[in-house]
Structure formats: C-alpha cells, structure tokens
Image (cartoon, rainbow, N blue to C red):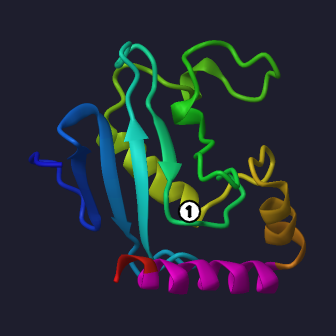
Amino acid sequence: MQSDKDIPGISCGLVDSNVFEWEVMLMISDECKFYGGGFFRALLTFPPEYPLLPPKMKFETPIFHPNIYKSGEVCISILHPPEEDKYGYESAAERWSPVQSPETILLSVISMLSSPNDESPANVEAASMWREDPKEFKKRVRKCVRDSLEDCG
C-alpha cells in the first residue's frame, strides 16, 4: 500500500498483478495485548462492484479470534453489505459504505484484534473462551502468535 496514509505494521501487495486481490501482512505491534508480535497473512478480495460492495478479508495464517471464522474469514460490520441487518443487530451506519477504504478496513481489523465483539461471534468457541476462560484464551492466542512467526520465517 503506497500512499501518504501508510499504516505502520501493514504491508500490502497485489496477487499476480490482480488489482482485485491483495495479499496483506499484518505485523501486530506489542501494544495489542493478545496478538502482539504476530505476523499474520491475509487476503483482501474486492468484488467487481467495489466500492459499492465491500471486499472480503480472509486470514491465511491460522488465527483464533471470536470474530474470525475457523476458515479465516473475517466477520466485522464494516465488511457487511450496505443494507439493513435482517437480525437488527447492526445499524446501516456500521456496515459497508463506499467512503470506506482499504486503510479503514485494515485499521478496523487491527482494532477488532484488540477488542473482540463476543456478542455476535463468528467463532463461538473463541467467544465463550474469551468470556469464561481468559487465561486459556490468551494461551491459545499466544500459540497462534508463535506459529505465525514460524510461518513467516
């Protein structure tokens, strides 16, 4: 990502010169109390209708988090289509809007890593562990961080 808004700890590049598919590397700072020190690879895939519809983000590096499906797909309001939530959980203002940018998406994901939303989990096991057994949650996450370092080496 080359712009005057470069975000420290994030590197992006096109996959096979395809502008609709970006490889992202998140190098999480030690300030992030759970995932700090980790190096997590992800794909950001933009639909042909972008910016009217949001991209999808999927972690390639295994990561244990309440808002990330076991498949690696990120579940966060900013990446949900710009329509009313049929369950009434999210307001339209929290969902995708064409004014969002790759930078705002990545900043939201980094924020999500520090502050999971366990009320609407993508990974129920991670959400219940986050609430009921924080010590075990931290242990699982630290293993993800260690594995991520081996993966990037």
For the point 60% across and 19% down, the residue is 92
For the point 67% across and 62% down, the residue is 65
* Viewer-nearest residue: 49 or 34: 49
Give coordinates of residue 59: x percent, y percent.
51, 55
Report which residue position mark 1 lands on. Answer: 113
Give coordinates of residue 44: x percent, y percent.
39, 41
- Asked if residue 117 is positioned above or below residue 99 in the image, the reply reads below
Give coordinates of residue 89: x percent, y percent.
77, 29
Can residue 37 be seen from the camera position used here?
no
* Secondary structure state at the residue bearing disc 1: helix
When asked about the image quadrant of residue 142, the answer is bottom right
Q: Which residues are magenta?
A: 134-150
Q: Could you tell me the amino acid type at mark 1?
A: Leu
* Viewer-nearest residue: 17 or 67: 17
Quadrant of the rendering where the C terminus is positioned: bottom left
Q: Is residue 102 left or right of residue 80?
A: left
139 in the magenta segment:
yes
Give coordinates of residue 13: x percent, y percent.
21, 50
For the point 30% across and 43% down, the residue is 22
* Viewer-nearest residue: 64 or 86: 64
* Majority secondary structure of magenta residues: helix
Q: Is residue 82 left or right of residue 54?
A: right
96 in the magenta segment:
no
